Amino acid sequence: MYQINDKVTTKLLRWYIENQRVLPWRGQKDPYKIWLSEIIMQQTRVVQGTPYYLKIVDRFPEIATLAEAEEQEVLKFWQGLGYYSRARNMHHTAKTVVSKYNGVFPSEYKDILKLKGIGPYTAAAIASIAFNKPYAALDGNVYRVLSRLFGITMPVNENGAANIFQKLADELLDRKEPGQFNEAIMEFGATLCLPKNPLCEMCPVIMHCEAKKQGIENTLPIKIALKAVKSRYFHYLLIKHDTHLYLKEREAGDIWQGLFDLPLIEKENSLLLDEKDVRNFLNNEEVILKPLKKINHKLTHQRLEITFYEAHINMESSLLNGKSILVDLESLKQYPLPKPIELFLNDYLCNPKIW
């Protein structure tokens, strides 16, 4: 159906050798560090993820060090990257490698794929880059490059599309240097074959690009919108007691699982809380309520409108029935917090009178 030109593979490899970015994990053969970089860079821009990679490798230089850490510490190091299930899966996998593989990262694709949080793309990247195994890595960049090279108008998330794209990636793969080729095509997508306004004038394979020939390079790849963005309205209560503040750990089954935030009232609309709302939440305790600040925070499929309040209450309130903990303000940095909560508290506690 689609004709493979061997010159594309050769040209992409030559382009990569001459133009690759200098990145701290580039040229790395340690599967642990390759795995870390791949997990961190999922849904994350390189400029944002690089400092996280460096500090995580510095704190956890070996997989055994990561396995021995407490989950709360791992989440704290991950704080701000989002998609916290990545950090929890990463921690789980580190423990698995230590317990099942004696601390040695498995080298076979099928074994790598069994590890928690590792899908076909990440398994192929690790197997090819660390162990020179002939597996083509298919990430968002590669989907985009292939859809344009071959002029594929089929939506990339339609049933059956993954098999078509994987077959094309497999056929283009350089069998002698699979890891280098995977890095080359991903790097090409990340730096030249951009989602918007691709740099076609600098493209080493432009004469082979069907999308360019047809003038549809800016419309590919096509993706079907599958999930609507949901709006949620969070109302956080800042409850202080001398030099302490109440936090609570977020439970499983929702965003920010395992992180700590403030006592929360979630409503179905953006209307401000009144004292009656808070009294009901606090089981009819007396309360003095002061709105502080409203912010918006976007997640992949959720839009959060967050309002913060000072709530002055009777400190024996049954709100604190085991669901909240009293934390000294000096110890806040030890707790992994969602980014909007961390930013607000840093600002508020440094400048409480500006509100």
Image (cartoon, rainbow, N blue to C red):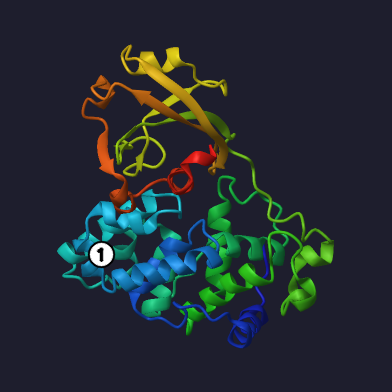
Give the residue drawn at x 27%, y 59%.
Answer: 93
Give the residue drawn at x 48%, y 30%.
Answer: 234
Quadrant assignment for the N terminus? bottom right
Give the residue drawn at x 39%, y 65%.
Answer: 123
- Asked if residue 7 is positioned above or below residue 2 in the image, the reply reads below
Amino acid type at circle 1 is: Leu
* Quarter of the view holding residue 127: bottom left
Give the residue drawn at x 59%, y 73%.
Answer: 187
Residue 337 in sight here:
yes
Task: Point out residue 227 in the picture as x, y percentages from the top left corner.
Answer: 57, 36
Task: Point out residue 103 in the picture as x, y percentages from the top left corner.
Answer: 20, 70
Determine whether the residue tagged by mark 1 lies in a helix, strand or loop: helix
Task: Point out residue 279 in the picture as x, y percentages from the top left corner.
Answer: 37, 14
Nearest to the observer: residue 293 or residue 171: 293
Q: Which residue is mark 1?
A: 66
Nearest to the observer: residue 68 or residue 276: 276
Residue 89 in sight here:
no
Nearest to the observer: residue 340 or residue 217: 340
